[in-house]
């Protein structure tokens, strides 16, 4: 709710500092929803491109977002304590309608994911720390 | 061709201990290859990029083995697969390298992995145009390391970034080892070992081939 309120048009966001907060909130909410295996909650916070991406994994054809995300739940390994080992957010860099989030993958390695502003909200735009889409002949 | 090359390589081999990388900075590293048939160091030929993307010269390091590949995400790790991968790497006299060959087995997701070089905007380019990857051999904290600017297209997407392998000798084998090595900030993590051998190409190996009645390695482009 907080993220939605912040994201609503006309809420008086004061530029990148406000955007950074919203991205941070979106990132944490996504991790929480994913860990709770809440496919609808995850789908509400990912972009159209990310929905297509998760639906296309493993040469599949996208179905519905919640169903595709439930498939992804099976692929992500859990740590021994049953959690998924969520990488902590380290930095957010905003460039227009795109945000690059840097997270700590292990003690000494970093990964980056991209968020985009879509329908007034910051949404995850790519599930993996990739640098580009798969080539057409691999889909 | 590959079996002939391996026949040569088995004798004209390079021990990991024979890699001599000089002190930092890395660009001053000197690479010496040990010719086991003569028991003395041999200088690898200069690398030439005149016919890029075809790279010429250098010693050739062959490595193959099984590597566990994992994609680390903001939700946790996703296992990509345990892939049997073979590479050949051209090594110049000062440690600069170019990857000239990359193959993976086709089991599971491993078959959904192709090397790439161009930016994501370049699509449908021939596989032959997707190599080489650039890299270098440097002196790491515990011995020589091979750094590679990896680029892989997969069914999950494109992964790019620098990854590091340790070059070590283990129970008499020469091993190229990645220990949870993440390629740049891509999240693609490699873990496993490749056995490797090195052939010294160029005039020296041709002389060896003539003397022993075998074909010179097919990658000898001089």
Image (cartoon, rainbow, N blue to C red):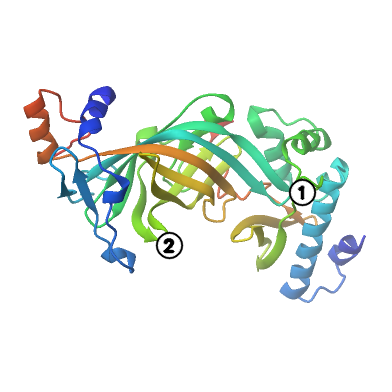
Q: In which chain is the residue bearing label 2?
A: B
Q: Chain of mark 1?
A: A
Q: Quadrant of residue B21?
A: bottom left
Q: Please state, as top left, top right, bottom left or bottom right, where the C terminus of chain A lies in the image.
A: top right
User: Is residue B126 at all visible to an observer of this figure?
Assistant: no
In the image, B133 versus B175, the foreground residue is B175
Residue B44 in the image: above or below residue A92: above
Residue sitting at 28 percent across and 25 percent down? B2
Name the side, left or right, on which B102 lies relative to A100.
left
| Circle 1: element type | loop
Circle 2 sits in a helix, a strand or a loop, which is it?
Answer: loop
The local crowd at label 2, few if under 14, some if 14 to 19, many if 20 or more residues have their Cα within 10 Å, is few
Compared across the picture, whether A131 is left or right of A106 comes to left
B125, B155: nearer the viewer: B155
- Rounded to the nearest whole Å, what is the CA distance between mark 1 and mark 2? 41 Å
Residue at numbered disc 2: B141
Residue B149 against residue B6 in the figure, above or below: below
The dot on residue A46 is 1
């Amino acid at each position: 709710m907080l993220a939605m309120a912040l994201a609503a048009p006309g809420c008086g966001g004061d530029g990148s500092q406000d955007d950074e907060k919203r991205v941070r909130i979106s990132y944490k909410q996504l991790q929480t929803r994913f860990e709770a295996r809440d496919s609808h909650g995850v789908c509400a916070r990912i972009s159209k491109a990310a929905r297509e991406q998760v639906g296309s994994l493993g040469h599949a054809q996208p179905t519905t977002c919640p169903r595709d995300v439930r498939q992804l739940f099976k692929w992500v390994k859990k740590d021994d304590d049953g959690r998924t080992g969520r990488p902590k957010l380290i930095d957010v860099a905003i460039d227009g309608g795109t945000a690059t989030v840097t997270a700590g993958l292990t003690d000494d390695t970093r990964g980056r994911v991209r968020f985009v502003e879509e329908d007034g909200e910051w949404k995850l735009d790519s599930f993996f720390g990739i640098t580009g889409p798969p080539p057409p002949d691999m889909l | 061709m590959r079996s002939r090359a391996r026949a040569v390589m088995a004798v004209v081999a390079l021990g990991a201990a024979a890699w001599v990388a000089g002190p930092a900075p890395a660009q001053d590293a000197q690479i010496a290859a040990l010719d086991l048939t003569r028991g003395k160091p041999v200088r690898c030929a200069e690398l030439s990029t005149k016919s890029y993307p075809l790279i010429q010269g250098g010693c050739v390091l062959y490595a193959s083995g099984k590597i566990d590949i994992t994609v680390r995400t903001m939700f946790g790790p996703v296992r990509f697969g345990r892939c049997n991968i073979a590479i050949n790497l051209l090594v110049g006299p000062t440690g600069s390298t170019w990857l000239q060959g990359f193959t993976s087995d086709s089991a599971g997701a491993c078959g959904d992995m192709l090397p790439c070089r161009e930016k994501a905007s370049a699509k449908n380019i021939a596989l032959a145009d997707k190599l080489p990857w650039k890299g270098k051999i440097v002196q790491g904290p515990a011995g020589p390391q091979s750094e590679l600017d990896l680029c892989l297209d997969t069914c999950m997407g494109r992964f790019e970034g620098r990854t590091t392998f340790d070059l070590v000798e283990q129970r008499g084998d020469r091993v190229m080892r990645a220990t949870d090595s993440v390629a740049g900030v891509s999240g693609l993590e490699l873990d496993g070992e490749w056995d490797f051998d090195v052939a010294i190409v160029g005039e020296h190996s041709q002389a060896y081939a003539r003397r022993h009645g075998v074909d010179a390695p097919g990658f000898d482009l001089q």
